[in-house]
Image (spheres, grey):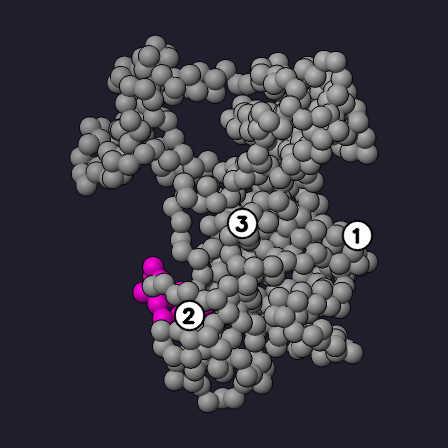
Amino acid sequence: MRVVKAQYQTALLPEHRENPLIEALPAKLQDDELIEGLRFYPDCSAEEREKEAFERVEYLTRLKELRQPQLVHLDVFRAVERALKEGYSTKNPHSPTTMNYLHYSLDERPEIEPRTGFFKPRGSGITVIGESGVGKTSMLEQVLGYFPDVIVHEESSTGLLPLRQVVWLKVDCPDDSSVKGLCHRILEELDRKLGVNPTKPASTIALLISQIEAKIKSSFLGILVIDEMQNLNLAKSGGSDRLLGFLHNLVNNLGIPLLFCANPPFDELLSKSLKAARRAESGGYFDVNLLGQRNGEWELFVEELWELQWTNVVTPLTEALSNKLYELSVGNMDLAVRTFREAQQVIIGSLDERLTEEVLEKGASIAIRASKSARDELAHVKKLNLLKRKKKAKAERSEETKANSSKKAAVAAMDGKLVQIPGDLSRAHHPEFADMLTALQHADDLYEQIPDPDLIQRASEEDDPLDSLRKAGVFCEDPLKVFA
């Protein structure tokens, strides 16, 4: 647990300035600085490879410490950073609004409104969904680890401010989906972070909820992270609804941002309730998928993983070895690390410590046992997707797009880049037409640019409409030839 003394810096947004809860948060980083802070590459030296076999085996535990950020890491981090500031924006400790919020519940507050107005919650929901082993929990540890657990305020730019600010709290969802069980976990974790003696839980659910809400308020909790939310699917009838209702009340009444982390069954539960789904994705919805072999994600990961060899000879990474490890792990980072670890453990101390495809298969047979059926199912789905025939037109457009991209830059309304949004028919999606479509979209004399506005209407009344359009020169029978 990281407890730091508040160090204030001027907030970027004017509306956040002189709010010590926001100005005490770590400084906002550029993407390259953020990536540097999220990544971690364990040491692996030539000297270590020269040690005795029984010693080198011990170093294999470092493999689990490898952290290679992917694009989704940046997106989740920015969502958490945004949610923290948004939630704190209405809880300035120096504001009469916050004093009213701290002392009264929503149902019990007096009718006399503070001069700065009544408290208006600004909490949001973030959902992270992904298969087991794809790195959701380690990603959250990396993201949350950037922020201190607790910030101790003694004085701010506007005067004394003795309080402990709990920036984030992470608990696991109870297996029985009980509100009582979750409240107990939140209460225990809050006491631990605040450094106080354990609080005796109230005897009834209603009193327990009030107790939790008061504790959350006084600790200025920034974001509540709940892992293993797929446990809701195992609950008795109605349990999941009650738990989600309790959590959404924290957002609606206290303005506490929530982050749900779960395996895929959780998204099915959310889809059954529009209200729950809307609230859970209001701050961002992120799918953490298996690493893609064709988009560079797998290559980025496996190159760093392959550096961590404690064998007495270093085996260079080849395309065949990379493909074999991907085939065995189906792009699951956890399975890949375990396979690579067991493969090394098998050969360290042997006469031949080279890594081969067969050695990787042996490592997989040891590392992947209980999860083999799930791994095989994922591999089966991947192969089915590969067998699907790609449409000819789609392939041709892809090749044409690649050829055109090197010849001219994509065009947007303000000379920016072409952004393709699937389903958005209001913008250009094809680079070859982007110039003309953008010019037409923003033209002031659009009607004047149409030489014959009644052409289509007249053609529809002809016996052969296509022949009429062909003679007018607006019907293109061979677009590949014309636009080549």
Q: Residue at x 62, y 54 (%)?
A: 260
Q: Is residue 126 left or right of residue 476?
A: right
Q: Earlier in the sequence, mark 2 or mark 3?
A: 2
* Dot 1 alpha-carbon crowd within 10 angstroms: few under 14, some 14 to 19, many 20 or more: few
- The residue stretch that appears in magenta: 11-23
Q: Residue at x 50, y 49 (%)?
A: 77
Q: Is residue 369 visible?
A: yes
Q: Earlier in the sequence, mark 3 or mark 1?
A: 3
List the residue tagged with mark 2: 20
Q: Is residue 75 visible?
A: no
List the residue tagged with mark 1: 234
Q: Amino acid at mark 1?
A: Leu
Depth check, mark 1 against mark 2: the one in front is 2
267 to 391, vertically: above or below: below
List the residue tagged with mark 3: 143
Task: Quote the CA–CA distance across marks 3 and 1.
Answer: 28 Å
* 280 falls in the magenta region: no
